[in-house]
Image (cartoon, coloured by chain):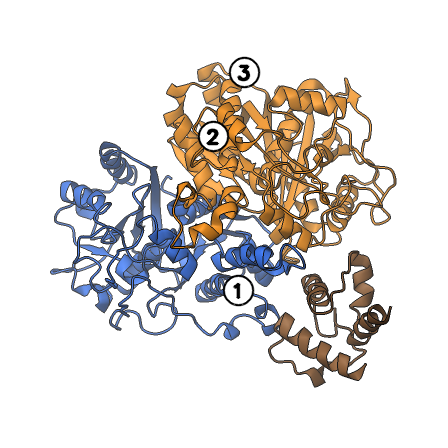
């Protein structure tokens, strides 16, 4: 992705922290003892008419609400295009329909969970609510779901015909899916919680969920939070390819390591995959302050979007949230540029570069 | 018939999750779809599921379904006709 | 936009054939692939016809050249189509690290996970089914296919219901036009599942007989399965490689209706916008289109809406059009790519494929699909339509390479 203009004109995040409402910057981290971080859900009635709300499952409400709030926060009219990412879509609807098929022996099935299990159902709802008849797409590729949605958005802004894209993601965790993933070692075996996430050096992480949306535009507006300079995805890279990828990425954007004021890293306390971060940072930016983010939002397919949201808020506020201050002994005087490096289960690796405006 | 209609209204409210609606808010002859209760085509499928699960009546043709599901009255009449048949 | 995007290879597997040649032969012989499932455990198996790929999952694994365990039917169908596409484009292992894959699926590995789902969630059960535990999502098939053939430059999966693989082709084309990739393999894969059969049945839009697109007495769709991939390359890459161009992807558009979660708008607003804008991008006018491979699912709503959109765009000069879903069934995420390949074939073979099972015009929109096989018909520009849930409408324009 070349140096095109992509401004975050507004955003919204529903996460396990008070990011949607409340003062996220001054409040301490919401902690959990268990290995799953649950999203703090807002009052949906303020965003969605009751007649629409009655049928919607949890993820649809979360996704739609974050999307509408991002539009609201941008102070801009409806987006021209809507592009989202989700690794798993509405798991509760998928699970419900699988169970209904068995319970009712394939007879007299309610279509609603089937419809809502469709990965693009949130997109359809956003388009309906926003009367947005332009391009509409949904990417469903684990740790490259939001990332491809962002890339598609940036390319369309660069093409010039699109002024604003509503770009975001949504993910939920269910008890059933948490159990399924525990069978293949996704989560820590002992109850660890988010406050001790980095202290145990054991395999696995803790789960998360949430929805993050951005109104992206090719113009800097009054509400603009930050500028997304670029992004690079690397699929199952070797150590060398990862290292080369970072250098190429920074070169392409004409940025040296010294120009990066903060690194936000996706390390999640998993002893099996955190070495990617350790090796890359110690070789390339040992002196740059680094903060992790998954103790806030938990590990999930679209956690990368939360990091982008976090970076944008730090660039806008020019300070670190209280919950992250302990990670940085000497904070920089100003936050001009933030590099994010995140990977999902060691397979999908992404760099993002954001800049203060 | 009155009893059946009352029961139907309660079942409709539950099946469609009409949170702010009470049975007495639904007029027997008011249109369930469009301007009336504001239900849509997915609700109509859910109401057909209700008929099948609660009354064991299967509506095969969606075009026929529209007539049956026009109002609480028409639904009740349909159920009764099937039950006495 | 600097680069033109060319189609240089294609591969597919459907109920009417294991490869492009077999599909073409079945289309010409007017042999439909609709029948009753042999591989799915469902109470509907003798009631709701489907277009199932005839081979068992074990046979597909042999055809794909991989072990069966851990590979879902979705992945295996995809791999078979992928290997044909690579061979047809003359791409080798050495080309793969620089190649991207944009895949599409609507239910990923549901075909296999739904069989063992209750074992997966039962802590007391252990066994081989655990190999399928992480195959339910749509990325599993994409990564297995990419890893098997060595694709490395870019990877993405799209899921927009029935328009998924048309959107995959668009995104691949966009990546090429921006110079991010020289070669993008785009398409989709979909296996029949009890989940989707029951899902569409709960929407009351599966026909118990062979589907009748655009017919007054149409009564729903028949589900199908299959996979299809097209190799897209930039003009400069085509020159570098000396690749043979099969056709050009000259235009595309994705438009949303913002009308209803599942139903299309009665006037076909989204279909109209998608076709019109795709055509504008291709630089072709309405009278330069000789054939439209319509979405034509044979549901009451789709065909009425799509028919109206055709009348709105083309007036009284609607080109030859047909739905090929009576052959292949509605293959959901794979449909866009399968029908894009049929569109390329229409151009290369100069043929218009028949719309089977049509006898009477719809009263909602009086358009008549082509019911005969037309050979030696001059086709240079084809529109291929794929519309889906969530108001998602996609149209592609495929043009003869000149």
Chain in brown, by letter, is B
Residue in front for this viewpoint, C38 or C245: C38
Chain in orange, by letter, is C
C-alpha separation, residue under disc 1 versus residue under disc 3: 49 Å
Q: Earlier in the sequence, mark 3 or mark 2?
A: 2
Name the residue: 57% across, 38% down.
C191
For the residues beneath circles 1 and 3, the answer to whether they share a chain is: no
Chain in blue, by letter, is A
- For label 2, the residue is C184
Which percent across, then down, holds residue A25? Answer: 27, 69
Q: Is residue C334 left or right of residue A309?
A: right
Name the residue: 68% across, 43% down.
C45
Which percent across, then down, holds residue C6? Answer: 54, 25
**Residue sticking out furthest to the front:** C124
Label 3 Cα crowd, 10 Å radius (few <14 / some 14-19 / many 20+): some
Q: Chain of mark 3?
A: C
How many marks overall? Answer: 3
Q: Chain of mark 2?
A: C
- For label 3, the residue is C244
- For label 1, the residue is A57
Q: Is residue C106 left or right of residue C204?
A: left
């Amino acid at each position: 992705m070349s140096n095109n203009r992509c401004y975050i004109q507004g955003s919204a995040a529903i996460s396990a922290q008070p990011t949607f409402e409340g003062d996220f910057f001054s409040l301490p981290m919401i902690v959990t003892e268990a290995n799953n971080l649950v999203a703090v859900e807002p009052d949906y009635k303020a965003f969605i008419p009751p007649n629409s709300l009655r049928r919607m499952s949890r993820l649809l409400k979360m996704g739609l609400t974050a999307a509408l709030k991002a539009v609201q926060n941008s102070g801009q009219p409806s987006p021209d295009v809507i592009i989202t990412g989700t690794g798993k879509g509405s798991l509760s609807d998928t699970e419900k329909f699988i169970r209904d098929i068995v319970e009712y022996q394939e007879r007299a099935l309610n279509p609603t969970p089937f419809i809502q299990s469709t990965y693009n159902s949130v997109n359809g709802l956003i388009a309906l609510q926003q009367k947005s008849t332009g391009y509409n797409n949904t990417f469903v590729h684990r740790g490259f779901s939001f990332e491809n949605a962002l890339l598609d958005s940036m390319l369309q802004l660069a093409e010039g015909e699109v002024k604003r894209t509503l770009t975001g993601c949504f993910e939920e965790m269910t008890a059933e899916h948490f159990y399924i993933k525990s069978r293949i070692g996704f989560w820590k075996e002992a109850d660890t919680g988010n406050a001790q996430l980095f202290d145990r050096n054991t395999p696995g992480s803790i789960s998360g969920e949430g929805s993050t949306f951005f109104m992206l535009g090719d113009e800097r507006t009054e509400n603009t939070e930050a500028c997304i300079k670029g992004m690079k995805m690397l699929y199952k890279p070797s150590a060398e390819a990862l290292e080369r990828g970072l250098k190429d990425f920074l070169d392409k954007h004409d940025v040296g390591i010294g120009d990066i004021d903060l690194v936000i890293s996706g390390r999640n306390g998993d002893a099996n995959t955190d070495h990617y971060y350790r090796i890359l940072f110690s070789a390339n930016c040992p002196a740059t302050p680094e903060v992790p983010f998954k103790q806030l939002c938990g590990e999930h397919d679209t956690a990368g979007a939360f990091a982008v949201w976090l970076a944008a808020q730090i660039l806008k506020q020019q300070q670190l949230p209280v919950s992250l201050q302990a990670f940085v002994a000497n904070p920089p005087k100003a936050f001009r540029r933030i590099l994010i490096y995140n990977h999902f289960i060691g397979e999908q690796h992404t760099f993002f570069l954001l800049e203060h405006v | 018939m009155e009893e059946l209609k009352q029961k139907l209204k309660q079942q409709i409210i539950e099946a469609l999750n009409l949170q702010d609606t009470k049975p007495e808010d639904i007029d027997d002859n008011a249109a369930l779809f469009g301007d009336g209760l504001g239900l849509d085509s997915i609700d109509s499928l859910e109401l057909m599921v209700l008929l099948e699960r609660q009354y064991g009546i299967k509506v095969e043709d969606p075009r026929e379904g529209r007539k049956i599901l026009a109002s609480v009255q028409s639904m009740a009449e349909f159920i009764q006709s099937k039950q006495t048949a | 936009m600097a680069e033109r995007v060319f189609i240089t290879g294609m591969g597919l597997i459907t109920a009417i054939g294991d490869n492009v040649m077999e599909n073409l032969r079945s289309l010409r012989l007017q042999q439909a692939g609709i029948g009753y499932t042999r591989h799915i455990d469902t109470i509907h198996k003798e009631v709701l016809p489907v277009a199932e790929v005839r081979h068992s999952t074990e046979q597909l694994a042999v055809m794909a050249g991989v072990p069966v365990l851990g590979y879902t039917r979705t992945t295996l169908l995809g791999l078979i189509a992928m290997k044909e596409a690579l061979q047809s484009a003359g791409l080798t292992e050495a080309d793969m690290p620089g190649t991207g894959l944009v895949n599409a699926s609507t239910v990923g590995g549901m075909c296999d996970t739904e069989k063992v789902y209750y074992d997966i969630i039962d802590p007391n059960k252990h066994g081989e089914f655990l190999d399928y535990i992480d195959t339910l999502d749509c990325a599993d098939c994409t990564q297995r296919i990419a890893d098997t053939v060595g694709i490395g430059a870019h990877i993405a999966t799209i899921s927009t219901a029935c328009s998924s693989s048309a959107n995959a082709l668009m995104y691949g084309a966009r990546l090429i036009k921006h110079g991010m990739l020289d070669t993008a393999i785009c398409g989709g894969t979909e296996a029949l599942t009890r989940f989707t059969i029951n899902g569409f049945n709960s929407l009351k839009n599966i026909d118990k007989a062979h589907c009748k697109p655009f017919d007054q007495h149409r009564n729903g769709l028949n589900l199908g399965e299959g996979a299809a991939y097209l190799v897209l390359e930039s003009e400069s890459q085509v020159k570098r490689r000396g690749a043979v161009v099969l056709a050009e992807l000259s235009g595309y558009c994705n438009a949303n209706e913002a009308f209803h979660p599942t139903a299309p708008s009665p006037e076909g607003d989204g279909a109209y916008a998608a076709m019109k804008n795709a055509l504008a991008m291709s630089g072709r006018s309405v009278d330069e289109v000789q054939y439209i491979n319509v979405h034509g699912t044979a549901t009451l709503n789709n065909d009425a809406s799509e028919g109206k959109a055709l009348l709105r765009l083309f007036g009284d000069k609607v080109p030859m059009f047909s739905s090929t879903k009576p052959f292949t069934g509605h293959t959901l995420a794979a449909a866009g790519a399968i029908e894009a390949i049929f569109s390329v074939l229409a151009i290369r073979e100069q043929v218009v494929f028949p719309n089977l099972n049509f006898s009477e015009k719809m009263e909602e929109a009086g358009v008549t699909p082509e019911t005969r096989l037309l050979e030696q018909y001059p086709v240079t520009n084809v529109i291929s339509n794929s519309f889906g849930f969530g108001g998602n409408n996609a149209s592609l324009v495929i043009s003869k390479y000149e």
